[in-house]
Image (cartoon, rainbow, N blue to C red):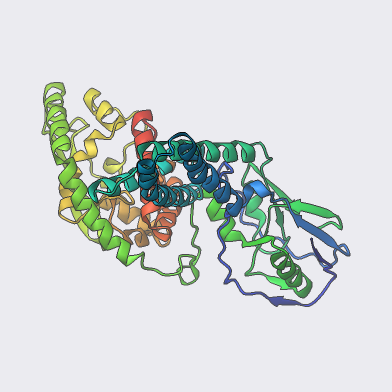
């Protein structure tokens, strides 16, 4: 248990170099995403004599316990059952490779599940089966093409037992209450109290607090005893986090007030992954081309029958590194007389009367975006990334929103983090929120986030979320 007394003292600054993962031990706590005001909280001049804090983290939330039991249930238990039932020499020889393979598949599935579940808004129970299915499938594919002997029953039982155990852990942790986080009452922590489904505990009373973590504004001037308190908490195994990391982990947004002090670490995204992703985009274009061509042909026929006008719609959009390009879409609107205000013409609002009957269906299932495979092949776009805006809208947003242009640091995409979290937007206030989602994507630019976006896109397509 960490203890500290914090009477009135002369303040001195504390470094903000800590950048801890906000949901390291409990990634499956669902959180609603709201924001409060950014008001500052002053350090109390006089405070109670003592604050007692201890962690609520139990054994079920510990990674070693989860993985250790998973290894026993998913690797050793199926092996023991197999040896007891089929103990022949030939069967045992085939189990050697299977033991190694299931161990690797379990580790990859567990790691992948942990990575997916740390992203905000993730439906954790829905990530268990895909994570382990992908890992076991990849290892089996490797064994098949490498012509290695393996036992199908061992792999099947290992997969089932691993998934079964992870669901037990999930439902056990779901029975616990929401996150309970202690808040050091100093600096820009007022906005935390607008985030719901988290029990925020202001540490201002001389009483014992059982919490999952401590959050503080590490860039504020804190009295020396508060700094000692935070150091003692860390030494006692209680997670201490900066307020911005907590907000980011719970809302899925990165807020930047000043580009010189941004939280992205570097202004450039992961260059290695950027190049690898470009290769992946091209390979996926080759694989998807026949299906895309068929869907576009059927949609083009429906457009011709439904309304007069061209099949395709072309528009100048702001693209990679701030360079305009011509984006291709299937036409979903009726041709309108020329509108002098290009910004107004570029905005699609809810229940827009310009949208045709066929166009509404194409928009709902995002089929109208498929011709952008041409833009992907030409290097102007990616399958996944911030959506490109029309040039007049981009100019308007750049004039109204600070750092809007920074979102062009990665290739725009057909789908993105903001699209699966927020849907279609048009107003400046909505675009600012979308911009924070884009910054989050740039900061966490990785294969894991792209796979999560891809999964969310399938749900979005079938639900019609955010379409206009």
Q: Position of residue 272 (x, y in %)?
A: 31, 65
The quadrant where residue 464 appears: top left
Please give left or right for residue 89 compared with residue 36 in the image: left
Answer above or below: position of 157 versus 382: above
Please give left or right for residue 330 compared with residue 193 in the image: left
Please give left or right for residue 440 compared with residue 268 in the image: right
**Which is more toward the observer, 198 or 28?**
28
The mark tally for this picture is 0
**Which is more toward the observer, 138 or 467?**
138
In the image, farthest residue toward the right = 49
**Which is more toward the observer, 398 or 273?**
273
Residue drawn where x is 55% and y is 65% of the image: 19
Q: Quadrant of the N terminus?
A: bottom right
**Which is more toward the observer, 83 or 165?**
83
The answer to whether one can see residue 426 in this image is no
Q: Quadrant of the C terminus?
A: top left
Answer above or below: position of 452 versus 38: above
In the image, farthest residue toward the front = 89
Q: Position of residue 53 (x, y in %)?
A: 78, 58
The answer to whether one can see residue 148 in this image is yes
Q: Position of residue 324 (x, y in %)?
A: 21, 57
Residue drawn where x is 57% and y is 39% of the image: 170
Q: Position of residue 199 (x, y in %)?
A: 70, 46
């Amino acid at each position: 248990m960490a203890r500290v007394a914090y009477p009135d003292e002369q303040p001195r600054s504390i470094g903000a170099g800590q950048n801890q993962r906000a949901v390291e031990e409990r990634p499956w706590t669902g959180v609603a995403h709201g924001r409060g005001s950014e008001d500052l909280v002053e350090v109390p001049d006089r405070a109670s004599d003592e604050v007692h804090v201890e962690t609520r983290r139990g054994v079920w939330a510990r990674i070693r316990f989860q993985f250790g039991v998973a290894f026993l249930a998913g690797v050793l238990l199926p092996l023991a059952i197999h040896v007891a039932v089929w103990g022949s020499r030939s069967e045992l020889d085939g189990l050697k490779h299977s033991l190694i393979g299931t161990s690797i598949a379990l580790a990859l599935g567990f790691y992948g599940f942990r990575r997916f579940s740390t992203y905000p808004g993730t439906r954790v129970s829905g990530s268990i089966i895909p994570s382990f299915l992908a890992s076991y499938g990849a290892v089996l594919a490797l064994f098949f093409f490498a012509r290695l002997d393996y036992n199908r029953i061992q792999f099947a039982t290992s997969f089932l037992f691993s998934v079964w155990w992870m669901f037990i852990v999930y439902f056990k942790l779901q029975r616990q209450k929401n996150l309970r986080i202690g808040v050091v009452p100093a600096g820009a922590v007022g906005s935390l109290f607008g985030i719901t489904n988290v029990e925020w505990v202001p540490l201002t009373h001389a009483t014992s607090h059982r919490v999952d973590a401590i959050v503080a504004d590490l860039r504020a001037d804190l009295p020396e005893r508060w700094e000692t308190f935070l150091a003692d908490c860390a030494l006692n195994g209680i997670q201490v986090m900066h307020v911005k990391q907590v907000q980011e982990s719970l809302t899925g947004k990165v807020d930047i007030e000043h580009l010189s002090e941004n939280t992205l670490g570097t202004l450039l995204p992961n260059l290695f992954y950027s190049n690898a992703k470009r290769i992946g985009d091209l390979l996926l274009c080759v694989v998807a081309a026949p299906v895309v061509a068929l869907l576009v042909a059927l949609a083009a026929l429906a457009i011709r029958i439904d309304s007069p006008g061209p099949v395709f719609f072309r528009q100048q959009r702001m693209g990679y590194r701030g360079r305009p390009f011509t984006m291709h879409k299937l036409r979903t609107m009726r041709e309108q007389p020329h509108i002098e205000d290009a910004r107004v013409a570029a905005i699609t609002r809810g229940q827009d009367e310009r949208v045709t009957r066929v166009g509404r269906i194409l928009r709902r299932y995002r089929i109208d975006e498929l011709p952008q495979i041409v833009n992907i092949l030409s290097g102007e776009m990616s399958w996944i990334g911030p959506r490109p805006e029309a040039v007049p809208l981009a100019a308007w947003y750049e004039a109204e929103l600070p750092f809007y242009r920074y979102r062009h640091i990665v290739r725009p995409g057909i789908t993105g983090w903001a699209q699966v979290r927020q849907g279609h937007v048009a107003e400046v206030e909505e675009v600012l929120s979308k911009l924070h989602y884009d910054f989050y994507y740039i900061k966490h630019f990785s294969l894991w986030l792209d796979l999560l976006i891809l999964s969310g896109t399938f749900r979005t397509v079938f639900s019609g979320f955010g379409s206009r």
